[in-house]
Amino acid sequence: MFRYDLTHRRPGEAIMADLLLLQMLDLDRCPHCGVDKPSLPAHGTFQTMAQGASGPRVWSAYGCNRCGGVVVASAAAFGLIVQEVFPESRNVPDDIPERAGAYLKQAIASISAPAGAVMLSASAVDAMLKTRGYTDGSLYARIDQAAKDNEITKDMAAWAHAVRLDANNERHADESQPMPTTTDAERCVDFVVALAEIMFTLPARAKRALAPH
Ligand SMILES: [Zn+2]
């Protein structure tokens, strides 16, 4: 669980100040299934109070009509600006190459269509590896080579193998392979987000921090 972080919102994203604690939660995207403009009606509202606080925190629990996932949000009072949302939505990390970012964005939005999300996740990894010169062989062969070259850690390569990123199975519709589930899709997307952060976001942030001012 992450605290909803206002400072990480990027230009173009809906501003959190627009989000109010109402009968419907007006999120851009369901944090569970990734569907655009989810229908999220409130199923219950309650309040909590911290010791010594001047007022209560009011919480509403919302259910996604698409996937049944629950989103919980809080504000100082019903009808006021939302301060916290759990769980946090998956976002495309900063500084990743444009093409990989476009695939990842679509993968996040299509978790409710898992076979598509898995293929898009593989395409995102493919695009990231290509920017580092890994163009030949299967996706997994290139991931392993990137680990050998210390572009990524061996743990990241092991994680890649642990998720069902093998888009070939989807493309060739291998009858012996079970269809990917939304859990498979979420695991693939989470791996791609982590890989993007390690390969691009963190190095770019380090470079900015070390740049002469
Ligand atoms: Zn949903």
Image (tube, rainbow, N blue to C red):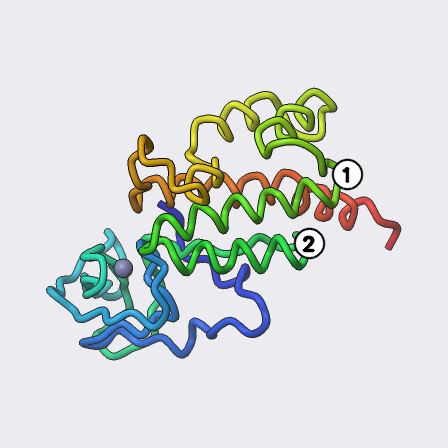
Name the spot of residue 146 as percent of width and height, x first. Answer: 69, 28
Q: Nearer the viewer, residue 28 or 131?
A: 131
Q: Nearer the viewer, mark 2 or mark 1?
A: 1
Q: Is residue 139 above or below residue 63?
A: above
Q: Is residue 17 above or below residue 68?
A: below
Residue 108 location in percent, x, y? 44, 55
x, y percent for residue 46: 13, 62
The residue pinned by badge 1 equals: 133
Instruction: Tell me the amino acid under the disc marked 1.
Output: Gly
What label sits on residue 206 in the rendered view?
Answer: none
Residue closest to the far right: 212
- Within the image, what quadrant is residue 8 found in? bottom right
The structure residue drawn at horizontal position 49% and vertical position 51%, both measured from the top left corner, is 120
Which residue is label 2 attached to? Answer: 97
Quarter location, residue 132: top right
Q: Residue at x 60, y 21 (%)?
A: 154
Q: Is residue 169 left or right of residue 136?
A: left
Between the C-alphas of marks 2 and 1, the distance is: 13 Å
Callout 1 secondary element? loop
Kind of element beneath mark 2? loop
Badge 2 crowding class, 10 Å Cα cut-off, few under 14, some 14 to 19, many 20 or more, is some
Q: Quadrant of residue 125?
A: top right
Q: In which quadrant will I find the N terminus?
A: top left
Q: Are marks 2 and 1 in contact (CB under 8 Å)?
A: no
In the figure, is residue 70 to the left or right of 36?
left
Residue visible at 62% across and 53% down in the picture: 100
